Image (spheres, helix red, strand yellow):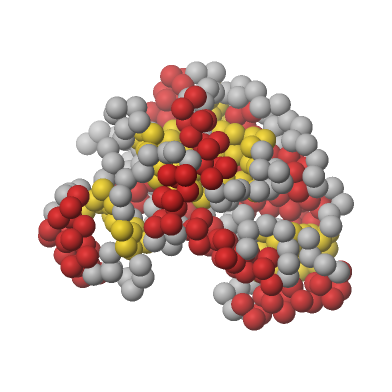
Amino acid sequence: MNFVCISPHFPPNFVSFWTRLAAAGIRVLGIAEEPYDQLPRELQQALSEYYRVENLSDYAEVIRACGYFTHRYGKIDRIESHNEHWLELDAALRSDFNVAGIKRDEIMDMKLKSRMKKAFKQAQVAVVDGAIVDDLAAGRAFIATHGYPVIVKPDNGVGAADTWRLNSDKELEQFFARKAAIDYFMEPFVTGGIETFDGLVDAQGQVVFSSSLVYGSGVMESVNNEVDLYYHIPRILPRDLVKAGLATVKAFAIRERFFHIEYFRTPQNQLIGLEINIRPPGGLTVDMFNYANDIDIFTEYCNIVQGRPFSAEISRKYDCFYAGRKYGKPYSYSVDEILNRHGATIAHHQPIDSIFSAAIGNYGFIIRTATKEEGRAVVADIHQLNSL
């Protein structure tokens, strides 16, 4: 099997996907802008060959790279990045090289916020109205119907980047005065917490692994208001979330890939579909899958790619938390002090790449405990600030 991976060095914790494929005897072929000698050593060893391009956004360059691999090794069997930024590139390459997976004519239904609602409705999941707002007049027209507050975000956006809550005419005018020259999507603000249905689907469309994230603080608030983010993987997934998640996966016709689907849970306990991401959840969440279950999700993905069954036991042994810190805040306890106080529960900790730090913090901790209460106590110590 010839497996082309786009930007295989990023994010760093995804390198394990490619090392597991290589260990299984799959020919792993990398394309990226990074000089080869700056790739992690374990990635260099996993790659059968690496093609460096000057600019991954130059489609002609990437076409030449895939053409070279085809000439040298034969038909390409898979093309994947697991990276939101390159999903459209992946799909275009699959179309042009007749590779299994999501194609150019399908990808935007899974990328554009304005198109996602159709599939949520097909899954019989509730949604709120939304619309593309190109200018101030369109924004005012939407407000006239729905009122404040509203959320506005890039229609083709990544995570919570450039996502804003608008509460007044003044904030609406300020937004349109500074907005970038791209499509923005506006929808009513929904009161509630975010819960996700995450997992992996095999080639037949069966969900072979499922998990969830429950957010204790919002990503948008973390980005815009410097709030410390935390979320956790619960040991028991709510039945209504699983039902909605399975129906959503079916409606989007996902095959042989990871998914990360976001829902609001309102104070009335209603689930409202927010958006879908057809890639693994970001940050250190994939590692949390492993720590929560004592499994190796990277190897299990390799099994799925080869048409083998998902073999790990999904035990959900632990409540698994992520807690991020931001530089410049007067935390009560240093990293060493946190480890001294809670070392038995800290499964992993590390600095966070600057690209992700606005959302999830500059330094991250993965915590696993037998109960939610224990985990929340550790998170509270990690986020505790010195009183003035």
Screen quadrant of the N terminus: bottom right
Q: Please identify the quarter of the rendering in which residue 174 is found.
A: bottom left
Image location of residue 142, percent across then percent down: 21, 57
Image location of residue 352, percent across then percent down: 51, 50
Nearest to the observer: residue 311 or residue 22: 311
Q: Is residue 364 toward the left or the right of residue 117 in the image? A: right
> What residue lies at 48% left-to-right and 25% top-to-bottom?
238
> What residue lies at 44% left-to-right and 38% top-to-bottom?
124
Image location of residue 317, percent across then percent down: 61, 22
Q: Is residue 110 toward the left or the right of residue 28 in the image? A: left
Nearest to the observer: residue 25 or residue 363: 25
Residue 115 against residue 210 in the figure, above or below = below
Disc tally is 0
Residue 337 visible in the picture: no
Residue 118 visible in the picture: yes
Residue 131 against residue 226 in the figure, above or below = below
Screen quadrant of the C terminus: top left
> What residue lies at 38% left-to-right and 28% top-to-bottom?
380
> What residue lies at 75% left-to-right and 44% top-to-bottom?
304
Q: Is residue 363 toward the left or the right of residue 224 in the image? A: right
Q: Please identify the quarter of the rendering in which residue 62 is found.
A: bottom right
Nearest to the observer: residue 276 or residue 302: 276
Image location of residue 386, percent across then percent down: 30, 34
